[in-house]
Image: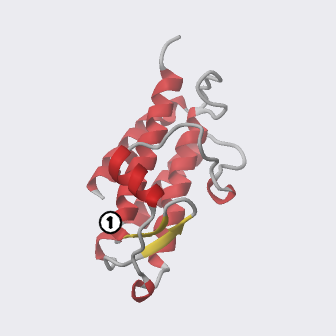
Amino acid sequence: MQELHKLLNQLESDISSFDKVNLAVSSGSVGWHIEHSLNTIDQIVTACKNSNPSNYQWRFNFNRFLILILAKKIPRGKAKAPKIVRPEGEISSETLGLSLSKVKENLMDWKDLDKNTHFPHPFFGILNKKETENFLALHTKHHLMIIDDILKPA
């Protein structure tokens, strides 16, 4: 989870550019990508905390293997964010700061969770704690790359 904390710091450093948009890169603003990333982390961590580790059973998933293990990169434009993690309402530096604080607080006891803590991903199947950490880092990096492309000078 140390890697995710570094990525959160990168998201935090981009908050000041929350209103920047580059339609050639994405229809979402920098703030949209930050909020989506934070929503995703918060929802998944909460789902893991609410899971029953004794119910976890590993199953092979080709998509998980291909993306999380081999490619280690999420392709752009191939999937749409589930409604539950899509930002709604006004995005400001204040709302992003509050979301970031909420995520950091939610992550505080992550290290104490059982290794079979899990959540159901719609594309990758059931992810345990380690797989979840890898997914969250990969997903956050994906959106940080989009943010970097939005902020590149024309």
Question: Taking 154 as reference, is 135 left or right?
Answer: left
Locate residue 37, reporting x and y percent: 51, 49
Which of the colour schemes (rainbow, by chain, secondary structure, one colour) is used? Answer: secondary structure
Which residue of the protein is positioned furthest toward the bottom in this rendering? 54
Name the residue rendered at 59%, 47% in the picture.
95
Name the residue rendered at 55%, 59% in the picture.
123
Residue tagged 1: 130
Image quadrant in which the N terminus is located: bottom left
Which residue type does callout 1 highlight? Lys
Name the residue rendered at 42%, 64% in the picture.
105
Question: Taking 23 as reference, is 65 left or right?
Answer: left
Locate residue 39, reporting x and y percent: 56, 55
**In-front residue for pair 96/26:** 26
Question: Taking 13 as reference, is 147 left or right?
Answer: right
Which residue of the protein is positioned furthest toward the right in this rendering? 89
* Mark 1 closeness class: few <14, some 14–19, many ≥20 residues within 10 Å: some
The kind of secondary structure element at disc 1 is: helix
Q: Is residue 26 above or below residue 125?
A: above
Name the residue rendered at 48%, 80% in the picture.
51
Q: Is residue 139 above or below residue 26?
A: below
Locate residue 98, reporting x and y percent: 53, 53
